[in-house]
Image: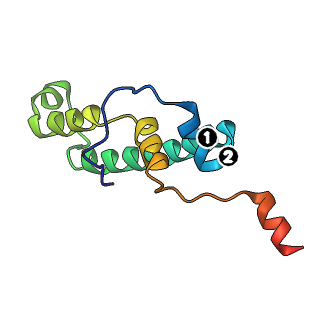
Amino acid sequence: MEIKKNIPNNTVTRKLAELEEGSGNIYKTVNIIARRANQISSELKVELNKKLADFSSPTDNMEETFENREQIEISRYYERLPKPVIIATEEFLDGELYFKNGKDKDKTEA
C-alpha cells in the first residue's frame, strides 16, 4: 500500500462543516471514514505479515529474534506510519473515496 507523504502523523482538529460537505451528514461521514480505516488497517496488517514471514523459521529462539536488525527496521517503519483513521480522513477530504448510498440505488431502479 502506498502512503502519501503529506499526511500528518498526529491528530489535527477538523471543522465539522468540512467533514459534513462530502456526504451531507456528519454521521455518514464518520461511518465512511471508519470503514475505509478498517480497510487500510487490514491491508497494512497483511503487508506487514508478508514481510515478517520472510524472517520466521520453525526453530526461532528469542536470541535470534532480538538480533535481526532488518526485522526491527521493518517493524519501526510500520510503527511510524500515520494511523489508518488519519489516512482515511485525508482521503475523504481530498475526494479520493468513492461511496454510494444504498437508498439512492433503490430510487433509481424504481
Report the quarter where the N terminus lies. Answer: bottom left
Q: How is the image coloured?
A: rainbow
User: Which residue lies at the image location 78% right of the left edge and 66% below the top edge?
Assistant: 105
Pick whichever, 34 or 101, lies toward us: 101
Left or right of 46: which side holds 36?
right
User: Which residue lies at the image location 20% right of the left edge and 44% below the top edge?
Assistant: 55
Against 93, residue 59 (above or below) is above
Q: Are marks 1 and 2 in contact (CB under 8 Å)?
A: yes
Return the x and y of residue 38 as percentages of the image width and height. Answer: 52, 43
Question: How crowded is the residue under tag 1: few (<14 C-alpha within 10 Å), some, or many (20+)?
Answer: some
Left or right of 73: which side holds 98?
right
- Disc 1 residue type (three-letter): Glu
Which residue is the site of mark 1?
A: 20
Q: Secondary structure at mark 2?
A: loop
The alpha-carbon separation of the residues under discs 1 and 2 comes to 5 Å
Which residue is the site of mark 2?
A: 24
Against 72, residue 108 (above or below) is below
Camera sees residue 39: yes
Report the quarter where the C terminus lies. Answer: bottom right
Left or right of 8: which side holds 105?
right
Residue situated furthest front in the rendering: 17
Q: Secondary structure at mark 1?
A: helix
- Disc 2 residue type (three-letter): Gly
Question: How crowded is the residue under tag 2: few (<14 C-alpha within 10 Å), some, or many (20+)?
Answer: few
